[in-house]
Image (spheres, helix red, strand yellow):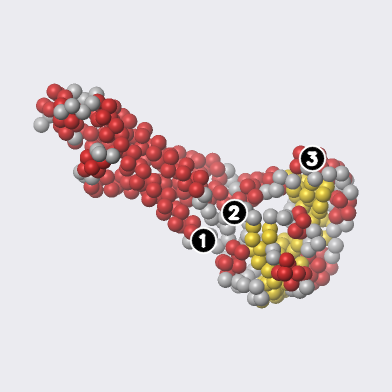
Amino acid sequence: MKYFALLLSNLFRKKIRTTLTIGSFAVALFLFGLLAVVRGAFNQGIAAAGIDRLMVMNKVSIIQPLPISYTERLLRIPGVKAVSHSNWFGGVYQDERNFFPQYAIDDDTFRSVFPEYVVPDDQWQAYLNDREGVIVGEDLANRFHWKVGDRIPLKGTVFQGTWEFNIRGIYHGKQVQDDTTQFWLHYKYLEERANAYWKGLVGWYMVKVDNPDDSVRVAKEIDETFSNSPWETKTDTEKAFATGWAKQAGNIQFVILSIGAIVFFTLMLVTGNTMAIAVRERVRDLAVLKAVGFSDVFVLVLVLAESVLIAAIGGVLGIGAAKGLTLLGDPTHGMLPFFYLSPQIALVGFAVALAVGVVAGLLPALSAMNLNVVDALRRV
């Protein structure tokens, strides 16, 4: 630490250049943090998917329904622990840009299949007692400043007409990645008000298995049970379903990794050039240090420390800015509800910044270490 003042004086000899280099690191780390948040948002459903749940859909398409009579047949399949079902509602709240997922759920079975969603018992009972009652996620409630007791109008799209609902409860997730942007209404109320086509039909089934190791076998048996019927099924694990859904937006991970690699490679070149110029400007000073007794290793560490310190300051500023942005909430208004920068990703970003600082400063530091004192002192 006794040489820290010397380090700072060398570092800020050219204040504008150093500031711009630190700014380059800050921008790069901010971009890294933002890309990591976007990747995490796209993979949210994959991370939160239950390892013991299966999704049973119509083989033709997820928008095609299935008969509600399949419930009992699914329960008779060996290895099935519980079965629930949902329908997509698709209403519009005030403006079409106010998108959020809306599901008509089976009140009797939903919580047994999705135990990670927690609703206070008194609120759940109030919901059961109100045919127009709904349960909403805490993030959704915060987004629109809703509270228990509010009456929410939705304009139907799939199910035509104006629908009004009473918020009877607000659920939260047991884990940070759990989706708390959903809107749940009664399946029985939807079936009651929908046109005749929807009587006795559901959108898809969620099946909970006794043993996750049996998931593949159970999925295969489900599809075989309903093969050659008018309503054939396609069954996947919840994780496989979430992965397939995310891939519809393209290979997000490849794009993010490619952009990140290009940014950090460019940053390494910029920082390396900055340190090389700094060493050339201080050839005489470095020679004097060697002449008065400082070792070659000390000179190498001194130059390398400057590069690492620039990276560290820029890294902290960039990651801090990215974290600050996530604390402001989801800027996409529901398209990326899981807008969160984890401490682990922040540490990875900071470590990458330090690594770039080391690599970028290594060649200039080696050049300074190998500097010949006599030749250097002649460069005046």
Query: Residue 2: in sight, yes or no?
Result: yes
Q: Are marks 2 and 3 in contact (CB under 8 Å)?
A: no
Label of residue 214 in the image: 3
Q: Residue at x 66, y 63 (%)?
A: 171
Query: Of label 1 and label 3, which has the lower sequence position?
Result: 3
Mark 3 closeness class: few <14, some 14–19, many ≥20 residues within 10 Å = some
Q: Which residue is mark 1?
A: 329
Q: Mark 1: which secondary structure?
A: loop
Q: Quadrant of the C terminus?
A: top left
Distance of label 2 from label 3 (alpha carbons): 28 Å
Q: Mark 2: which secondary structure?
A: loop
Q: Is residue 15 above or below residue 137?
A: above
Measured from the top left, where is residue 4 in percent x and y? 26, 41
Q: Which residue is mark 2?
A: 176
Measured from the top left, where is residue 54 in percent x and y? 76, 48
Specify the amino acid type for callout 2. Answer: Val
Distance of label 2 from label 1 (alpha carbons): 14 Å
Q: Are marks 1 and 3 in contact (CB under 8 Å)?
A: no
In screen coordinates, is 137 left or right of 22?
Answer: right
Q: Residue at x 59, y 46 (%)?
A: 250
Q: Residue at x 70, y 48 (%)?
A: 50
Q: Quadrant of the N terminus?
A: top left
Specify the amino acid type for callout 3. Answer: Asp
